[in-house]
Structure formats: structure tokens, C-alpha cells
Image (cartoon, grey):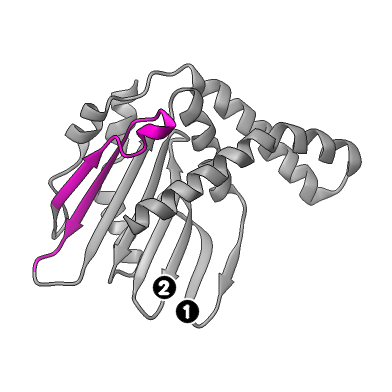
């Protein structure tokens, strides 16, 4: 429930951000023409509009389809539970799977939302922006940065003391993916993402 709560807060922030993109883009474009970093922001804002237009009329996968896609295991981790429709309050379809390794602290929770439809398209665009802006911060507790792994750009957070990893990214500019891995290094977590075979989702959506 703690992870879901954090996720819902993030989605709410993204939705508010998306509602302001058009206005901010117009004001920044007029007030600060020629400034390179602002120009980059305006460029990304235009991409956001394009993504929303592309996805808002698309038909999302059903919760049943998402559940059927969810694999029974990821490497040595076995699926111990799943939930569908947890993001239904936002009028989007979703699936969440929990995977554990027996006799180990290793645990991975993945939540996927289909970004098709009016509301989902705004969420998908927000997730896409998270990966497009370069950032990196580090202290004694965690290391957070923008990374690109296997052509996926994501916000990656590694908590040093607990050896936990979180990944947030948009796959194929449509599927919103949040991964929380306990007792797993970033490389291990990305290996699990590779085992997910997210390409199957895009094939189903065609």
C-alpha cells in the first residue's frame, strides 16, 4: 500500500503538470526566446502535445489482457500475487505483479498502466518527460539519475543502505512502468525488466 500511495501522488502531480504544459510553453517561448535550455523545454512540450494527440483516441488494453500478459516468474523470482484495476480511479487500465525469491529478501513489484485514452495519454506524456530530462543527484543515502538501458530512458533511484532500486519510465511512449526492487542492484533490476518482454504489450496493442 505504501508503494501504491507514492505512485498515486506521482500520477496526480503529473496530471497537474500536463494541464499546465500548454500555458507554460507559450509564456516561456515569448519571454525567453533564444535561451537554449528554455528552447529545449519548449521542444519537449511540443512533443508532449504530439504524444497526447496520438494516444487519446487509442483503445487501451483491457485489465484481463494485462493480467494474461503478466509472466508467472522473472528469472529466479516467482510471482506471488497480482492486482488489476488499481488505477481505475483515473479511468485507466493497469496491472501490478509481485515477484519473490524463496529463502531470500529479493522482491520485485512492477506496476504497468496503459497510457491509451484521454487520461492515460496525459500520464504517458508525463512519464516520457521524466526520462527526457537529464538529472543526477547523490548523497550517502541514495543515487538518483536519468539512465538509458536497452533503449529505455528512465529515472533510476538506488538506495545504498537497503540495496533497493526503483525505475520509472514510459515504454514505447505508451505503457507507464514503475518497478520497485528490494535487495537488488540496478543491474539486477534491469535484468528483470528485460525478462518482462514488454514488447509483447506493444504487439497486443496493434
Rendered residue at 27%/33% (across/down): 200
As drawn, the residue found furthest toward the left would be 103
Answer whether labels 1 and 2 touch (C-beta < 8 Å): yes
* Within-10-Å neighbours for mark 1: few <14, some 14–19, many 20+: few
Q: Can you say which quadrant of the picture contains the C terminus? A: top left
- The earlier-in-sequence mark between 1 and 2 is 1
**In the figure, is residue 145 to the left or right of 42?**
left
Q: Can you say which quadrant of the picture contains the N terminus? A: bottom left
What percent of the width, then of the height, locates residue 106?
21, 68
Quadrant hosting residue 21: top right
Question: Dot 1 lies on which element?
Answer: loop
Asked if residue 151 can be seen in this view, the reply is no
Q: Which residue is mark 2?
A: 159
Rendered residue at 36%/51% (across/down): 4
Q: Which residues are magenta?
A: 80-102
Question: Dot 2 lies on which element?
Answer: strand
Residues under labels 1 and 2: Cα distance?
Answer: 6 Å
What percent of the width, then of the height, locates residue 102?
9, 66
What percent of the width, then of the height, locates residue 185?
33, 70
What percent of the width, then of the height, locates residue 154?
48, 52
Quadrant hosting residue 42: top right
* Within-10-Å neighbours for mark 2: few <14, some 14–19, many 20+: many
Could you say which disc has been placed on residue 110 in the image? none
Asked whether 53 falls inside the magenta stretch, the response is: no
**In the figure, is residue 21 to the left or right of 87?**
right
Q: Which residue is mark 1?
A: 141
Amino acid at each position: 500500500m505504501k508503494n501504491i500511495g507514492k505512485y498515486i501522488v506521482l500520477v496526480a502531480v503529473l496530471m497537474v503538470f500536463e494541464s499546465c504544459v500548454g500555458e507554460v510553453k507559450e509564456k516561456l517561448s515569448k519571454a525567453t526566446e533564444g535561451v537554449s535550455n528554455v528552447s529545449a523545454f519548449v521542444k519537449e512540450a511540443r512533443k508532449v502535445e504530439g504524444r497526447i494527440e496520438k494516444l487519446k483516441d487509442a483503445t487501451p488494453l483491457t485489465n484481463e489482457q494485462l493480467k494474461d500478459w503478466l509472466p508467472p516468474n522473472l528469472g529466479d523470482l516467482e510471482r506471488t500475487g497480482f492486482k488489476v484495476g488499481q488505477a481505475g480511479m483515473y479511468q485507466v487500465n493497469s496491472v501490478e505483479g509481485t515477484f519473490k525469491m524463496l529463502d531470500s529478501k529479493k522482491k520485485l513489484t512492477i506496476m504497468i498502466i496503459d497510457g491509451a485514452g484521454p487520461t492515460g495519454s496525459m500520464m504517458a506524456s508525463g512519464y516520457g518527460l521524466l526520462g527526457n530530462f537529464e538529472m543526477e543527484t547523490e548523497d550517502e543515502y541514495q543515487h538518483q539519475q536519468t539512465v538509458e538501458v536497452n533503449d529505455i530512458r528512465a529515472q533510476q533511484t538506488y538506495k545504498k543502505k537497503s540495496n533497493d532500486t526503483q525505475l520509472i519510465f514510459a515504454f514505447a511512449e505508451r505503457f507507464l512502468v514503475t518497478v520497485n526492487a528490494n535487495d537488488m542492484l540496478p543491474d539486477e533490476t534491469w535484468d528483470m525488466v528485460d525478462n518482462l518482454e514488454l514488447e509483447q504489450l506493444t504487439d497486443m496493442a496493434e
